[in-house]
Image (cartoon, rainbow, N blue to C red):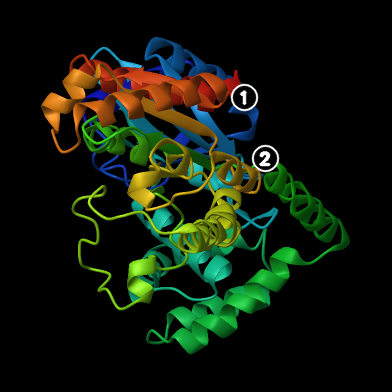
């Protein structure tokens, strides 16, 4: 990705110019052209941490980049979204600040790894065997198991560097652990053996009163995420023909890169519960609504049932499905339409109720962090998609504008110009909103 290349080229130039002691731990093969769908996993010497972030800030300024999310106690995960000369780009940087942690303790000697770095396209990278062995340790300690490829790579690394690894690892582990490690890597791959061994190593790393205090402190710090989750929710509103699908398809790539493949899409609601039509036997793979205004609205009881059934999904779907992911990691959930459609376009939802009832229920509905209202001249919309009468399009655009003016989380995006301009305005709006808390 050309725009990602501009950022990465600048980033490594500044790191080298500022003489930062660093190394890329994995997935370096495509650098600096792109991250090839991965994140950037980088280790930085403790003494250079502050200067590393100065280099990062210089890179952001040069490439009009912005930090939209930052989370993680021992290994900060920094999500960047920016707008360079050639367009928008996104990437995630995982910064190992002077340690390669399991919980709060170091699992591999950092100075040893930094001394053995190699060079790839003027970028410092970890020795492949060291990186393979570290990847094995990370897998078995964090997941209590690993795939066979990690095991076999670790076997090769161990037998080629056994003497020096023993010398370095004894500073972290004990002799008994190293004997058991040698015994494990001399046998064939066995998930049962790996599972048993992982508990031996993790107990050593978690041992000690001071370590336990640090672990409890780290656990306490994670509770902050429940107050301010790193994840983000966006609702995109607009009548048919306003450009919602086109805009989403264009912004998907940079957003997904920025949160490292954690971009999620939902139509209308969290979809924890099935569509009402599916409750009555419709196939979930069928296109349930071809003409959204072709069906008659339900009566009072039917409308109340629809409203409360789908409101249940909005409320419990958010707290059960959406919120836990927002707390756990940096992610973006995009909703194509949202609860507010019941106020703007009741015919689509086949609801026929007084507005005050819908607004009363709205107080219980979790609000998106950002609401994008897409619209323009009704005649332009009608020319693009003449499915609705122009009178209905005019009505919906006016209702949407009125809603946007009354909702402080909503931003109007005019889609009457070129798609490139609309996409740029949309992404700039998302950047400004997400980056505001990191200014």
**Residue 437 at x, y percent in the picture:** 62, 24
The residue shown at (31%, 42%) is 28
Q: Quadrant of the C terminus?
A: top right
- Is 65 placed left or right of 144 in the picture? left
The residue shown at (26%, 55%) is 295
* Residue sitting nearer the eye, 134 or 288: 288
The residue shown at (77%, 57%) is 215
Q: Residues within 10 Å of mark 1 (few under 14, many from 20)?
A: few
- Is 22 placed left or right of 88 in the picture? right
Q: Is residue 136 visible?
A: yes
Query: Given contact means CB atoms under 8 Å apart, are the residues at marks 1 and 2 in contact?
Result: yes
Mark sitting earlier along the chain (1/2): 2
Residue marked by disc 1: 437
* Residue sitting nearer the eye, 294 or 271: 294
In this view, the residue farthest toward the front is 299
**Residue 288 at x, y percent in the picture:** 24, 62
Which image quadrant for residue 395? top left
The residue shown at (26%, 12%) is 85
Q: Residues within 10 Å of mark 2 (few under 14, many from 20)?
A: few
How far apart, in angstroms, are the residues tagged by discs 1 and 2?
A: 11 Å
Q: Secondary structure at mark 1?
A: helix
Residue marked by disc 2: 228
Q: Quadrant of the N terminus?
A: top left
Q: Is residue 153 visible?
A: no
**Residue 373 at x, y percent in the picture:** 40, 27
């Amino acid at each position: 990705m050309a725009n990602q290349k501009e950022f990465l080229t600048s980033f490594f130039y500044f790191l080298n110019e500022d003489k930062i002691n660093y190394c890329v731990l994995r997935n370096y093969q495509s650098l600096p052209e792109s991250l090839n769908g991965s994140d950037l996993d980088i280790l930085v010497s403790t003494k250079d941490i502050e200067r590393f972030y100065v280099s990062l800030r210089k890179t952001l300024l040069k490439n009009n980049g912005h930090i939209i999310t930052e989370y993680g106690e021992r290994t900060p995960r920094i999500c960047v979204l920016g707008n360079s000369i050639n367009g928008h780009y996104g990437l995630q940087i995982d910064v190992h600040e002077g340690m390669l942690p399991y919980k709060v303790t170091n699992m591999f000697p950092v100075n040893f790894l930094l001394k053995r770095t190699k060079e790839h396209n003027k970028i410092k990278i970890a020795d492949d065997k060291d990186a393979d062995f570290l990847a094995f340790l990370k897998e078995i300690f964090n997941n209590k198991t690993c795939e066979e490829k990690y095991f076999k790579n670790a076997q090769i690394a161990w037998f080629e560097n056994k003497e020096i690894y023993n010398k370095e690892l004894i500073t972290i582990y004990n002799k008994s652990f190293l004997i058991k490690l040698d015994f494990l890597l001399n046998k064939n791959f066995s998930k049962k053996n790996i599972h048993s061994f992982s508990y031996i190593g993790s107990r050593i790393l978690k041992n000690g009163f001071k370590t336990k205090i640090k672990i409890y402190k780290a656990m306490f710090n994670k509770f902050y995420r429940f107050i301010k989750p790193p994840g983000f929710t966006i609702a995109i509103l607009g009548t048919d023909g306003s450009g919602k699908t086109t805009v989403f398809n264009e912004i998907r790539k940079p957003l997904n890169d920025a949160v490292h493949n954690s971009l999620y899409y939902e139509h209308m609601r969290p979809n924890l519960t099935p569509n009402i039509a599916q409750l009555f036997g419709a196939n979930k793979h069928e296109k349930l609504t071809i003409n959204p205004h072709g069906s008659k609205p339900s009566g009072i009881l039917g409308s109340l049932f629809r409203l409360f059934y789908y409101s249940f999904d909005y409320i419990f779907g958010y707290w059960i499905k959406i919120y836990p992911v927002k707390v756990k990691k940096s992610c973006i959930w995009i909703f194509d339409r949202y609860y507010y459609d019941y106020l703007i376009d009741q015919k689509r939802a086949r609801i026929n109720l007084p507005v005050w009832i819908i607004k009363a229920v709205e107080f219980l509905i979790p609000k998106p962090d950002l609401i994008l209202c897409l619209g323009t001249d009704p005649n332009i919309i009608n020319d693009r998609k003449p499915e609705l009468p122009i009178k209905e399009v005019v009505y919906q655009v006016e209702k949407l504008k009125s809603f946007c003016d009354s909702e402080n989380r909503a931003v109007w995006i005019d889609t009457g110009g070129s798609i490139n301009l609309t996409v740029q305005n949309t992404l700039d709006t998302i950047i400004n909103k997400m980056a505001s808390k990191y200014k």
